[in-house]
Image (tube, rainbow, N blue to C red):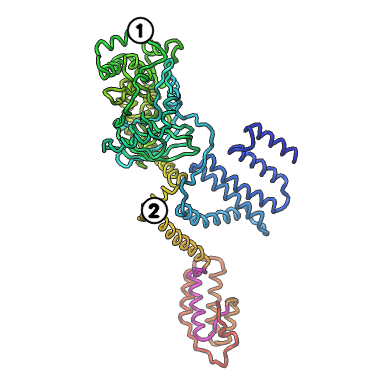
């Protein structure tokens, strides 16, 4: 055992680089409980193993807290409890009896546990489950390399959900900003580290907050439930005006000082139009590129400059170049050559994903003398009709451009010129066309209509998927991420004031716990016995004799009672024996077709029986013995 323990511990240290940490720690605990089981001999040893198994079952929440995992945890808990019933019960019981007892025990405890979960006062910060701290490979990168974002086109994992206080904006207005990139190197755009260091300045945040008060009134309010992410940039709807989480920067991006170690929620408001411009914007840095235009690219820029003079005209001319020339949108774009990749895209392949067009558009604007930058984030999302919220997936990752024109930032999305379906209807619709090889085909309109308005089996299947997604959303909000804010929201739905939240919780908690405990004790109160028609008939007979002074003892059989009754009423011996025999035949004999007729005969005989009260001197000592 000692050799096995040392070897196993060494393997854990080698596999995980140590025995500390979430995954390694749980693996170490699995090792310990396994070794404990191997050396167990007494009932107490097995009892300790079961208790540790309870802890291991709960530790699964550190990695997965989905509805499916909850069902698995419940099954584990019932199994472990059933084992405890087996090993601690002195009498031999079947496994099925142990499972029934374990299930009943857990079901009885469940109401109190659920009530305490929702109404026990919550500390600030929440009691959410802690996911694994492994790096999230789905997060947006700080570098935009042509072709890499296309890898997420088929990644259907959920990035975040958004619940709007009003109507959900149209898909073409849903631009979720995450990162702004201002440095270009060989057709690759980067988040400027110099700018990131400037954002740490709290005075800049105060300037933005002051201008926020003067921003236009029209705004959209929403709450985002973000999945676990290792990114310090958090998405907000363009153009964010107020942010509950993180620091708002000059470029409308929002960052947090360190990644969240779990899924998180935050609220925000956006005006959907640019409302803020820093007082001293360095436009010179927004014209610099590391790469230089080739002769063909310079000729293209010169032709654009001949027909456009102002920055807005230049930006519109570059946009028209992509819209009016045979460029294609592809979810699997070709690899560009290492030398002059922009030229290869503009003049040779002419096929790309959103990052190709955003990068090319921004680069051309800078070469033409218009300050511009690249923005990455997400675009669109799928509306869940069952829950009334928006689901944004990693496949919705998107890149677009912004040009600085007449003192304001103007969004340009060249992808909309190449593939308007992507912007208007979302990546889900576009992927449907792509998978059926209908992208750009004449039949794409009909396929798009069938996708947006399904009928028959497709509609039923979509309803099933939306119902399941809504169940997961509600589970995440009201269970996994349940914190003090959600508790206050629940109290508001129940009609309690938020100002007296703690008082309301104490009142509800007291009333609820008392009510549940009274319900538990009510189950211990003896319940009336449900008697059959035959039993009621015989009870009428004993009640009739009781009125005359002959009371049946609880321990007496029908024959014993009949003999004692005959002693008190010898003249009624035949009738008493007939009643007793009929009752015993119907109660203990085999079922017959004339059972109902015999029952009616028994009732008739009891009704016709006439008994007078016995003389006190003739009463036996047991005549008045009371029964329970």
Residue 299 image position (x, y, % from top left)? 32, 7
| Residue 323, quarter of the rendered image | top left
Query: In front here: 541 or 498?
Result: 498
Residue density around tag 1, few if under 14, some if 14–19, many if 20 or more, within 10 Å: few
In the image, residue 78 sits, relative to residue 301, either above or below, namely below
Give the left or right position of residue 628, taking residue 252 as reference.
right
The quarter in which the C terminus is drawn is bottom right
State whether residue 71 appears in this view: yes
User: Where in the figure is residue 585, as x and y percent of width and height?
Assistant: 55, 71
Q: x%, y% of residue 621?
A: 60, 87
Residue, disc 1: 296
* Spatial CA span between label 2 and label 1: 66 Å
Res. 491 mark: 2
**Callout 2: helix, strand or loop?**
helix
Q: Can you give x and y, in whole percent of width and height, for residue 165 in the image?
A: 32, 42
Q: Which residues are magenta?
A: 525-553
């Amino acid at each position: 055992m000692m050799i096995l323990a040392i070897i196993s511990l060494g393997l854990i240290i080698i596999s995980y680089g140590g025995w500390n940490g979430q995954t390694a720690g749980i693996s170490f605990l699995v090792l310990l409980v396994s070794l404990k089981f191997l050396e167990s001999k007494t009932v107490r040893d097995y009892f300790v193993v079961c208790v540790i198994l309870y802890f291991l079952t709960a530790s699964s929440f550190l990695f997965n807290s989905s509805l499916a995992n909850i069902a698995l945890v419940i099954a584990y808990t019932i199994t472990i409890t059933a084992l405890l019933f087996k090993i601690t019960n002195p009498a031999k019981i079947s496994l099925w009896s142990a499972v029934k007892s374990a299930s009943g025990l857990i079901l009885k405890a469940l109401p109190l546990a659920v009530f305490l979960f929702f109404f026990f006062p919550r500390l600030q910060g929440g009691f959410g489950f802690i996911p694994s701290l492994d790096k999230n490979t789905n997060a947006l990168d700080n570098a935009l390399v042509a072709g890499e974002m296309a890898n997420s086109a088929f990644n259907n994992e959920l990035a975040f959900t958004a619940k709007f206080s009003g109507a959900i904006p149209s898909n073409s207005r849903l631009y979720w900003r995450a990162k702004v990139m201002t440095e270009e190197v060989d057709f690759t755009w980067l988040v400027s580290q110099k700018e990131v260091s400037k954002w740490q300045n709290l005075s800049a945040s105060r300037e933005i907050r002051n201008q926020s008060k003067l921003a236009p009134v029209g705004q959209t309010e929403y709450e985002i439930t973000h999945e676990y992410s290792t990114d310090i940039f958090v998405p907000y709807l363009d153009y964010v005006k107020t942010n509950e989480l993180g620091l708002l920067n000059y470029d409308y991006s929002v960052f947090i000082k360190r990644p969240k170690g779990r899924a998180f929620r935050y609220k925000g408001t956006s005006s959907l139009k640019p409302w803020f411009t820093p007082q001293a914007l360095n436009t010179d840095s927004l014209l610099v590129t590391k790469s230089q235009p080739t002769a063909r690219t310079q000729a293209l820029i010169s032709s654009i400059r001949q027909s456009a003079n102002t920055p807005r005209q230049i930006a519109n001319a570059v946009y028209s170049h992509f819209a009016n020339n045979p460029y294609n949108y592809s979810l699997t774009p070709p690899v560009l050559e290492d030398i002059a990749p922009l030229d290869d895209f503009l003049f040779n392949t002419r096929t790309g994903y959103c990052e190709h067009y955003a990068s090319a558009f921004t680069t051309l604007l800078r070469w033409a003398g218009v300050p511009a930058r690249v923005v990455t984030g997400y675009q669109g999302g799928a509306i869940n009709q069952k829950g009334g919220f928006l689901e944004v997936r990693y496949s919705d990752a998107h890149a677009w451009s912004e040009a600085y024109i007449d003192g304001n930032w103007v969004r340009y999305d060249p992808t909309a010129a190449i593939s308007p379906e992507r912007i208007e209807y979302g990546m889900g619709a576009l992927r449907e066309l792509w998978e059926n090889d209908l992208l750009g085909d004449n039949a794409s309109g009909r396929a798009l209509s069938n996708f947006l308005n399904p009928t028959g089996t497709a509609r039923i299947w979509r309803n099933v998927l939306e119902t399941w997604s809504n169940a997961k959303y509600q589970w995440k909000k009201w269970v996994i991420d349940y914190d003090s804010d959600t508790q206050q929201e629940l109290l508001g739905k129940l009609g309690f004031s938020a100002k007296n939240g703690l008082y309301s919780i104490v009142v509800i908690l007291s009333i609820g716990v008392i009510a549940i405990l009274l319900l538990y004790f009510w189950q211990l109160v003896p319940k009336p016995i449900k008697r059959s028609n035959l039993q009621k008939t015989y009870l009428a007979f004993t009640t009739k004799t009781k009125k005359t002074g002959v009371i049946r003892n609880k321990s007496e059989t029908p024959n014993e009672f009949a003999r004692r009754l005959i002693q008190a009423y010898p003249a009624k011996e035949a009738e008493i024996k007939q009643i007793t025999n009929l009752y015993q035949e119907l109660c203990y004999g085999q079922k017959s077709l004339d059972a109902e007729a015999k029952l009616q005969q028994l009732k008739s005989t009891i009704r016709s029986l006439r008994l007078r009260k016995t003389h006190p001197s003739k009463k036996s000592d047991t005549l008045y013995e009371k029964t329970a």
